[in-house]
Amino acid sequence: PLNEVNALLQNYDVLVDYCTMEVNENNYPIAKYCLKKITDPQYCIALTVLHDILGELSELCQTFQRSCLTTIEAYCYAKAKIVKFHSQYLGEKVHSEKVKQQMAPFDNTVDTRGVLHFISEHCEHLDCRFPENELQEWSAFNIEALFPVKFDYGYGTKNVIKLVGKYQAVLNLPTDRSITECICEQYIDYKFIIVEKMKVGTIRTFADMVTYTLKEQQFTDLAHFVDICATFQASSADCKCGFSLMKQIKTKSRNRLEVNHMDQLISIKYYLAANKDVNLDKIYHHWTTDKYRREK
């Protein structure tokens, strides 16, 4: 829809001239109807607002396609857009320069109730898609929010307790309180370690934090929840990259590749794409010493 609205706005004057010519020369009924609509100031303002809204949503969609975008980050971007819409259009004044320019010749006498109702409904729809405090419990693993931890010893503990209660049955955790206390103790040590690692630069992103957590033995129980948080994909970019790699590897001439072999080749490709070192000699040695061979 954004492309169509863009095209309409860019050729608006041309469209008005064309419809006027058709009405004057041929008295064309459809041209009369179109001319009446496009010269209506209410229609012009609504079109300008629609262009702004669609442009903002397009930017949000592009943001959602970033690789390694966490769910918490995506949620924050979406909520920020909702607040921006409210502030820009639903406050005491309209803060869109384009809309102000459209309304200026008419001394603000144009009825904009329909447009404001559309924006209000749009914001309500987004609020339903991104409910308030939907990810409140997972903020315990928000890497950006962990910096104030040095000022608050108890930060995130309540959220971790809620997560334990929510996923206790899924993870087959013991029903007594000992496991909750154990995970909370792990979390207290964990958050301070993460902050210090962020200070020295050994952890920079959420992915780095997940990798460290899953490898560290002292956070075995807590790692279950970090792993769950990491599986919430806000973007489909990584999935698309995975399918693209698979198509590059499994061609028509290599269509007999099995799942394990394919998985290993994709892992190597991912490592190379991330500028990581892959010891091909070790890989070849492992392949030659592996006893399993596919039947011919």
Image (cartoon, rainbow, N blue to C red):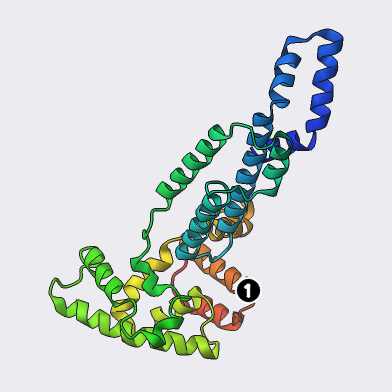
Q: Nearer the viewer, residue 23 or 180?
A: 23
Please indicate whether residue 127 sits to the left or right of residue 240 in the image. left
Q: Nearer the viewer, residue 207 or 52?
A: 52
Q: Going 49% across and 62% down the picture, which residue do you hit?
A: 76
Q: Nearer the viewer, residue 184 or 263?
A: 184
Q: Going 54% across and 34% down the picture, which residue do you hit?
A: 113
Q: Going 36% across and 65% down the picture, which residue do you hit?
A: 136
Label 1 neighbour load within 10 Å: few <14, some 14-19, many 20+: few
Q: Going 14% across and 71% down the picture, which residue do you hit?
A: 175
Residue 47: % across, % down: 66, 35
The amino acid type of the residue labelled 1 equals Leu
Quadrant location, the N terminus: top right
Can you say whether 39 is above or below 294 in the image? above
Marks counted in the figure total: 1
Any part of residue 234 in sight:
no
Residue 60: % across, % down: 58, 54
Can you say whether 23 is above or below 173 in the image? above
Which residue is identified by label 1?
272
Any part of residue 137 in sight:
yes
Residue 23: % across, % down: 81, 13
Badge 1 element: helix
Residue 193: % across, % down: 41, 88
- Where, by quadrant of the figure, is residue 159 drawn? bottom left
Please indicate whether residue 111 sits to the left or right of residue 26 in the image. left
Please indicate whether residue 99 sits to the left or right of residue 115 in the image. right
Can you say whether 230 is above or below 247 in the image? below
Can you say whether 275 is above or below 69 in the image? below
